[in-house]
Amino acid sequence: MKNASLIIAGCGPGSPDYLTPAARNAIEQAEVLVGAGRLLELFPNHRGEKIIVGSDIEKVLDEIDSESGRRIVVLVTGDPGLCSLAAPILKRFGRSRCEIIPGVSSIQTAFAAIGMDWLDARIIDAHGENPRLKPASLTKEGKIAVFAGRKDAIAWVVSLAKAIGKGRRIYLCENLTLDNERVRQIEPADLEKTEASSRTIVLIIKEDLFR
């Protein structure tokens, strides 16, 4: 750990196997662990204080602030740079006070599962609310990845897929790296009827990129 008093550690897409040694080392030295319940459960024997992250983010930030002076590690799913608690923490406490330990993201894992690079992928966050994007703005994208762990998000993806036209493959990637992982190619009509996991990535890829 560096001199930063607040560490934001990426914990990977789900399985403890995807937690980096750097993150494990920081967590072992932490006096306070902050994270969602399922992340804290990964460290049942940790002796530090634990703060559970719920829906009230401001309350969590206040609790972190009250622990100033102690070694604090905030656990975030995937990579801190992709749709995580890192953004409000950096805004509240400043970059000079924080250290970020990157992690394996579910986006990386999803593309790896279908054997494709993601350098030029358009990443869309629909996990919290539906994006305010016009389908026309996405018609030229060859690779689209959507954080889609909600029923309404799946419906939004279906409407997007129909709007941008044919000639694309859709992959539903659920519970990546976990025992119940499921990655499958799916048609919009079938996706519309699917109750996807809260840990879901949807990939929409142009067909000609597979040739």
Image (cartoon, grey):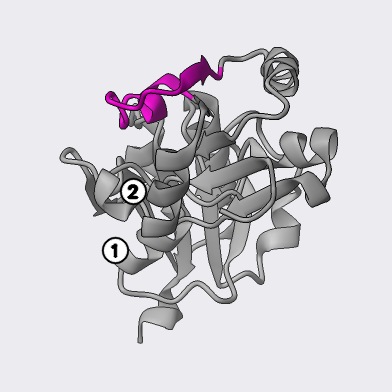
Residue 139 vs residue 93: left or right?
left
Label 2 secondary element: strand
Identify whether 51 is placed above or below 168. above
Q: Is residue 164 above or below residue 157?
A: below
Q: Amino acid at mark 2?
A: Cys
Pick out the residue farthest to the left.
Answer: 179
Residue at the location (56% across, 72% down)? Answer: 142
Which residue in the protein does label 2 denote? 173
The total of numbered circles placed on residues is: 2
Q: Quadrant of residue 66?
A: top right
Work out how far the residue at label 1 is from the one at label 2, CA to CA, in angstroms: 9 Å
x and y percent of residue 80 in the render? Answer: 59, 48
Query: Which amino acid type corresponds to the residue marked 1 in the rendered image?
Result: Ala
Q: Position of residue 99 (x, y in %)?
A: 66, 51
Q: Nearer the viewer, residue 36 or 105?
A: 36
Residue placed at 75% from the left, 60% from the top? 137
- Answer whether labels 1 and 2 touch (C-beta < 8 Å): yes
Estimate how packed mark 1 is, as few (under 14), some (14 to 19) or many (20 or more) residues with alpha carbons within 10 Å.
some
Q: Residue at position x 52%, y 56% from top? A: 145
* Viewport quadrant of the C terminus: bottom left
**First along the sequence among labels 1 and 2:** 1
Mark 1, secondary structure of its residue: helix
Residue 37 locus on image (x, y percent): 41, 20
Which residue in the structure is indicated by mark 1?
A: 113
Residue 104 visible, this angle: no
Q: Which stretch did the figure color magenta?
A: 36-53
